[in-house]
Image (cartoon, helix red, strand yellow):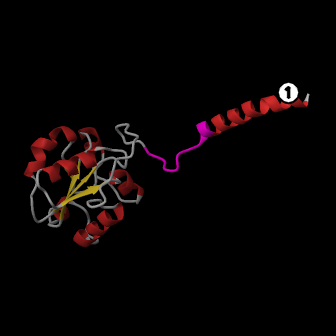
Amino acid sequence: MRLKNISWLPLVALLLFTVGCATTTPTTAVTPSAQGHTQLVEQDPKIRITTQEVMALFNEVYGDAPLIQETLDKNNKFILVDTRPITRFTGDTVPGSIHIPSPLMDRDIPKLPREGKEIIFYCGGLACPFTKEGSDKAQALGYTNVRAWYEGEPEWSKQGNYTII
């Protein structure tokens, strides 16, 4: 009887190992972007800007002023470029953003100023590829004032900031 129990031991160990591996969760949870992207986008640390840094820029430029068009028009420090599809942009966007979606990047990025203002590309979070696409295209065109806000609108909202329609 004892030999029969021992012959099952390797099979049980293999089964437990297989089940254990199948149920482990990744250490970094990826929130899918609104477009359904689930892979984290590779980030360029040289141009990365965090939500906290974007919020600091807003504070520096606008202070406590209401973020209405008249106030937003006085910004001479940075340009926010929302690269999400039109339905996401018109649904909610960070105040003061302009819209350059992926299909229009080749046409519209060259229209951005080359000097004077930091150009900050963003989209729908860490799994959204359009931030990287926009910042890469701008750099390929010779822009040196480019930043990539990989966390984008989802983290902006999560931090308690409002969006506009």
Give residue 110's position: percent from left, percent from top.
Answer: 9, 49
Give residue 156's position: percent from left, percent from top.
Answer: 35, 57
Kindly identify the amino acid type of the residue bearing the numbered disc 1. Answer: Lys
In the picture shown, does residue 73 fall above or below 5? Answer: below
Find the residue positioned furthest to the right. Answer: 1
The residue shown at (27%, 49%) is: 131
In the shown orientation, is residue 119 left or right of residue 25?
left
In the picture shown, does residue 78 fall above or below 163? Answer: below
Magenta stretch contains residue 141: no
In the picture shown, does residue 100 fall above or below 145? Answer: above
The residue shown at (36%, 40%) is: 34
SS label for mark 1: helix
Residue under pointer 1: 4
Query: Which region of the structure is painted magenta?
Result: 21-31
- Name the chief secondary structure element in magenta: loop
Give residue 162's position: percent from left, percent from top.
Answer: 34, 57
